[in-house]
């Protein structure tokens, strides 16, 4: 794993739940220096546990034992206090508002061993390694459709996209949303929830439309979880 440099942020408090999740973000600012300055600014009231620069350098900004302020109002699999139960990792990337671009190889190479170490120490299930858009679909789009979830999945560090034996269950739109909620998403903003699911599991087309491929992917994910293959 890359050397980790301490860059303490004052923005943290005590956890109220054991660590059971990892939330991945992009910084969404024009450069790393601006992002680091904001994450260390007491007035901003935001932070993360780790930040990974585009060259692969890792900064530790909040001790894992403390609650960093990275997820904001969020929800995942009945859990409403995501900050308390998660470790937040920020990836330097300008994001959709400042020239969104693919994540460099050096950055991904630094992320993988960091994730593997955290997962091993806290026994975090693959289904609880999520993007910010998964836990806050109405507010966030990060880490976005260019993030290489498939690469994480190959290392057992994220759920893979189902591709084999897909069957359309022909749910109504309401049935799809109930299934999506069962999987873990907050579906109070229906369009945002569907787009967040697409961004994560069908990123080549993010249109908010509930159709056969989306239904089939979600059904496969739910069946895998019931069979114990989607922990």
Image (cartoon, rainbow, N blue to C red):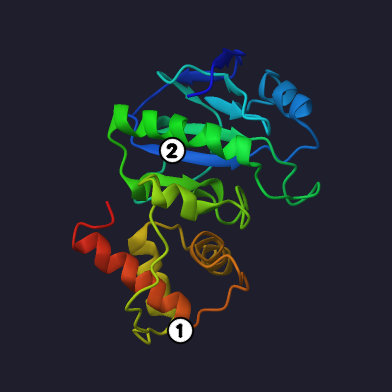
The CA distance from mark 1 to mark 2 is 30 Å
Q: Residue at 62% x, 41% y: name it.
A: 105
Locate residue 196 relative to residue 121 in the image: left or right.
Answer: right
Give the residue at mark 1.
212
Relative vertical location of residue 80 with respect to residue 62 in this rendering, above or below? below
Q: Give coordinates of residue 164: x percent, y percent.
A: 35, 74
137, 64: nearer the viewer: 64
Asked where in the image residue 94 lies, by quadrant, the reply is top right
Q: Is mark 1 on a helix, strand or loop?
A: helix
Q: Residue at 25% x, 60% y: name it.
A: 225
Relative vertical location of residue 117 with respect to residue 103 in this rendering, above or below? above
Q: Can residue 75 be seen at all in this image of the molecule? A: no
Q: Residue at 64% x, 25% y: name it.
A: 45
Q: What element carries label 2?
A: strand
Q: Give coordinates of residue 167: x percent, y percent.
A: 34, 83
How many residues crowd mark 2 within 10 Å: few (<14), some (14–19), many (20+)?
many
Relative vertical location of residue 202 with respect to residue 212 in this rendering, above or below? above
Residue at the extreme left of the image, as rendered: 227
Q: Residue 22 carries which label?
A: 2
35, 92: nearer the viewer: 92
Asked where in the image residue 129 lies, by quadrant, the reply is top left
Q: Give coordinates of residue 151: x percent, y percent.
A: 48, 50
Q: Residue 170 carries which label?
A: none
Locate residue 43 relative to residue 80 in the image: left or right.
Answer: right
Relative vertical location of residue 59 with respect to residue 216 in this rendering, above or below? above
Q: Can residue 36 be seen at all in this image of the molecule? A: yes
Q: Give coordinates of residue 174: x percent, y percent.
A: 42, 78
Number of numbered discs visible in the structure rendering? 2
């Amino acid at each position: 794993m890359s050397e980790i440099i301490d860059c303490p942020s004052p923005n943290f408090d005590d956890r109220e739940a054991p660590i059971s999740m990892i939330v991945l973000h992009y910084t969404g600012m024009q450069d790393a220096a601006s992002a680091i300055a904001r994450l260390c600014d007491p007035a901003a009231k935001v932070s993360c546990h780790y930040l990974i620069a585009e060259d692969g350098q890792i900064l530790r900004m909040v001790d894992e034992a403390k609650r960093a302020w990275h997820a904001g109002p969020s929800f995942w699999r009945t859990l409403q206090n995501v900050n308390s139960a998660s470790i937040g990792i920020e990836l330097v990337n300008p994001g959709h508002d400042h020239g969104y671009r693919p994540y460099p190889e050096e950055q991904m190479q630094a992320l993988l061993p960091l994730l593997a170490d955290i997962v091993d120490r806290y026994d975090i299930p693959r289904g609880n390694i999520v993007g910010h858009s998964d836990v806050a679909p109405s507010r966030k789009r990060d880490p976005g459709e260019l993030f290489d979830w498939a690469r994480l999945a190959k290392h057992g560090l994220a759920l893979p996209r189902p591709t084999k034996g897909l069957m359309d269950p022909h749910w109504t739109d309401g049935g799809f949303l109930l299934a999506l909620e069962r999987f873990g998403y907050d579906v109070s903003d229906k369009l945002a929830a569907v787009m967040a699911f697409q961004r994560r599991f069908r990123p080549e087309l993010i249109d908010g439309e509930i159709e056969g491929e989306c239904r089939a992917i979600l059904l496969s994910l739910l069946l895998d979880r019931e069979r114990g293959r989607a922990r």
